[in-house]
């Protein structure tokens, strides 16, 4: 098998995916109704008129939780394929994953000790 046999499906899927997204965006722009009215800019609150401005400040704690979720989500993306090939792999593959998990665990311990995981 050559390089092109291995990656041709990825290339075809990428081209088809790009075409579908592009055609959906163009179709929405051409076929969608666009009405200019004052009420479109008002935030929706269950059919009631909003009180005050529609801008709200979000605490940085929510962003930290989101970043930590992404870190550990990426960890699972790496661990599942590793678990599939684990028995047939060399010993250094185990130590690479062990190092990866230790680094992420140190990040979790650091966040825990700094009080990031405490909900106030």
Image (tube, helix red, strand yellow):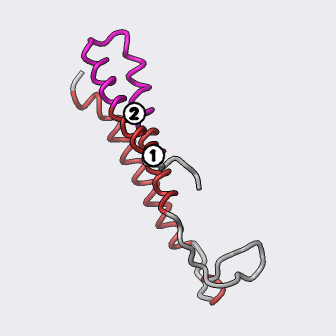
| Quadrant housing the N terminus | top left
Is residue 5 left or right of 49 when viewed as pictured? left
Q: Is residue 78 found inside the magenta-colored segment of the image? A: yes
Residue in front for this viewpoint, 101 or 38? 101
Instruction: Where is residue 23? Give x, y as percent.
Output: 46, 60
| Quadrant housing the C terminus | bottom right
Which mark, residue 68? 1
Residue 2, compared with residue 105, is above or below; it is above
Identity of the residue drawn at 39% across and 53% down: 18
What is the residue that sits farthest to the top in this orientation? Answer: 87
Q: Is residue 99 found inside the magenta-colored segment of the image? A: yes
The range drawn in magenta is 74-102
Identity of the residue drawn at 45% across and 46% down: 68
Instruction: Where is residue 22? Give x, y as percent.
Output: 43, 60
Dividing the picture into quadrants, the one containing residue 92 is top left
Identity of the residue drawn at 22% across and 29% down: 3
Mark 2: few/some/many CA within 10 Å (<14, 14-19, 20+): few
What is the residue that sits farthest to the bottom in this orientation? Answer: 38
Instruction: Where is residue 10? Give x, y as percent.
Output: 35, 37
């Amino acid at each position: 098998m050559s390089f092109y046999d291995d990656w041709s499906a990825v290339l075809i899927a990428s081209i088809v995916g790009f075409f579908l997204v592009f055609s959906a965006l163009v179709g929405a722009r051409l076929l969608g109704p666009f009405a200019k009215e004052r009420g479109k800019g008002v935030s929706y609150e269950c059919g009631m008129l909003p009180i005050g401005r529609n801008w709200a400040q979000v605490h940085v704690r929510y962003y930290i939780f989101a970043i930590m979720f992404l870190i550990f989500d990426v960890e699972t993306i790496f661990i599942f394929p590793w678990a599939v090939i684990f028995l047939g792999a060399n010993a250094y593959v185990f130590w690479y994953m062990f190092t990866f998990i230790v680094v992420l665990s140190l990040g979790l311990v650091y966040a825990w000790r700094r009080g990031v995981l405490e909900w106030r």
